[in-house]
Image (cartoon, rainbow, N blue to C red):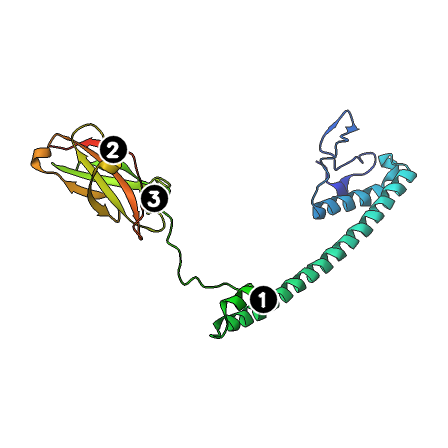
Amino acid sequence: EIPVSDLKPPQARLFFLNNHKNNKPNTTMDWIPDEEAPHDALLNKYLTYANLNTAPLGITVPKMIALNAANTLYIAKRDARRTYENQAAGIYQAARDAKEALHALWRTQAGEVTARQETTDEQRGFLGLTIADETPSAPPAPVTHPVITKIETPARLQHIAHWRDSGDLNSKRKPPGVKHAIILLQINGPAPTDPAAMQRIATDTSTPYLYEFDAADAGKIAHWAACWETTDGQISGCGPVMSWTIPA
């Protein structure tokens, strides 16, 4: 590519076009940048050279005058837009500062009113202020349930039951308001169809749960399930039953 400064008649050409064929300029417009800074730099470069080389470039005087007039109008509108944006930025910042100052005074006054022993809840309500709930309602029973996700057999007559909340099987956390998991177990027989009828053997606040069987249970099938109990005694539904052989 020949530097623009070295382009002289008859070498002069439309230097900004990257694609050309048979000396015909590429008329697509994707070579004009969208961003303002490179756009204006390219425009200024083009006009500077074109105005000095209209004849070698085959540009008629009326067409050059028209392009220069369009550029003058563009510069005027661009500068007007920049002025507006600068003014708007200052107005926006002033409005935000005024809002923050208002909120600081508003919070201070509201806090003083709320803190007065003489202020009634009725008055707080009229002001739109928060009224403290001195008798908070009990959390609802969980809509999820614990799931026995894995049984480990680290030693003879031992099961380690891992449980997770059905709402998030990747987390060991209990749902809000849950006190513990109720661990249910049935030894031998077919898997229970109603986990709630199984024997409650323990409560567990954190997974996993270790259980040691009697020697007489070796080789039998242990059926596991669990449910949640909230801090106020509400019981959730039970999770599915998982069955595993008791190692002898």
Identity of the residue furthest to the left in this view: 215
The image quadrant that residue 51 belongs to is: top right
Residue 88: % across, % down? 71, 58
The reply to whether the C-beta atoms of the residues labelled 2 and 1 are less than 8 Å apart is no
Q: Give above or below for 21 relative to 163.
A: above
Q: Tag 3 or tag 1, which sits nearer the N-term?
A: 1
Residue 30: % across, % down? 71, 35
Q: Is residue 126 visible?
A: yes
* Residue closer to the observer: 40 or 203: 203
Q: Give above or below for 82 relative to 130.
A: above
Mark number displayed over residue 216: none
- Distance of label 3 from label 2 (alpha carbons): 19 Å
At label 2, counting other C-alpha atoms closer than 10 Å, the crowd grade (few under 14, some 14-19, many 20 or more) is some
**In terms of secondary structure, where does tag 2 sit?**
strand
Q: Residue at x 36, y 41 (%)?
A: 144
Q: Amino acid at mark 1?
A: His
Q: Which residue is mark 3?
A: 171
Mark number displayed over residue 103: 1
- Distance of label 1 from label 3 (alpha carbons): 40 Å
Residue 94: % across, % down? 67, 64
Q: Which residue is mark 2?
A: 242
Q: Amino acid at mark 3?
A: Ser
The image quadrant that residue 228 belongs to is: top left
